[in-house]
Image: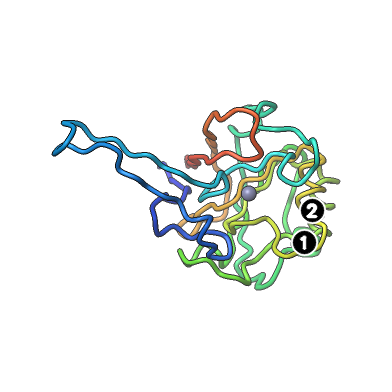
Amino acid sequence: MIFDVSMSIDKNIQVYKNADEKTPIFKTIANHQENNYHETKLMMNLHTGTHVDYPLHMIKEGKTSDTESLNKLIGFCKVIDFTDCEEKISQADLEKHQIEADDFLLFKTKNSFTDKFIFDFTYLDSSGAKYLKEKQVRGVGTDGLGIERNQKDHNTHKILLGADIVIIEGLRLKDIQPKKYQMYCLPLKIKAVEANPARVILID
Ligand SMILES: [Zn+2]
């Protein structure tokens, strides 16, 4: 069974804080009537929909997409149900689950149950990020458009990215049972940037 856990990108896709400038713009630059072929130009933020964040996003002179390793993005992952964590996921919530070194954890939260941006989306706090760093996980994916929200100093991002823990944001996990899957996360190959949109599939 293959599960596509990526967002569909269209002009109505949810964007961070519903900011107009983050909404993708599709422009038809050739059509069959006038040109005998069809072409579309897309202008969008690299953090649109499901995407991978690289250290440069929050760390000055941090690593970019050029340093990405597919070894981290392809492999087993564990989907964990945090739908009972209304506001945030902290160390105490993580401690209830078996987390091991090299795990790639995907957090299923209330965020997966709407396609609209929710301003109070569930996030990972810095105690949780520190705990995951101690556990030496490989990566962490969230169904929110941010791994944290309005946290001063962006500590969650900095702790994870500083420890080379991969962050995937904007997953869709509503229909996914919490358990182990084989994950394939394939970001676009745009060079030297701080994020890349990705297609993520889980195989049961
Ligand atoms: Zn991002």
Secondary structure of residue under mark 1: loop
Residues under labels 1 and 2: Cα distance? 6 Å
> Image height check: is 176 above or below 93?
above
Give the color scheme: rainbow, by chain, secondary structure or one colour: rainbow
The quadrant in which residue 162 appears is top right
Indicate yes or no: mark 2 CB to ligand 1 under 8 Å. Answer: no
> Image height check: is 172 above or below 34?
below
Residue position marked by numbered label 1 in the rendering: 125
Secondary structure of residue under mark 2: helix
Label 1: few (<14), some (14–19) or many (≥20) C-alpha neighbours in 10 Å: many
Q: Residue at x 50, y 55 (%)?
A: 172
Residue position marked by numbered label 2 in the rendering: 129
Nearer to us in this view, 54 or 76 = 54
Q: Amino acid at mark 1?
A: Asp
Q: Amino acid at mark 2?
A: Ala
Q: Residue at x 61, y 54 (%)?
A: 142
Q: Residue furthest left?
A: 33
Q: Is residue 61 left or right of residue 173?
A: right
> Image height check: is 91 above or below 32?
below
Q: Residue 92, percent across and down?
A: 80, 64
Q: Residue 152, percent across and down?
A: 81, 62
The quadrant in which residue 73 appears is top right
Q: Residue at x 73, y 37 (%)?
A: 102
How many numbered marks appear?
2
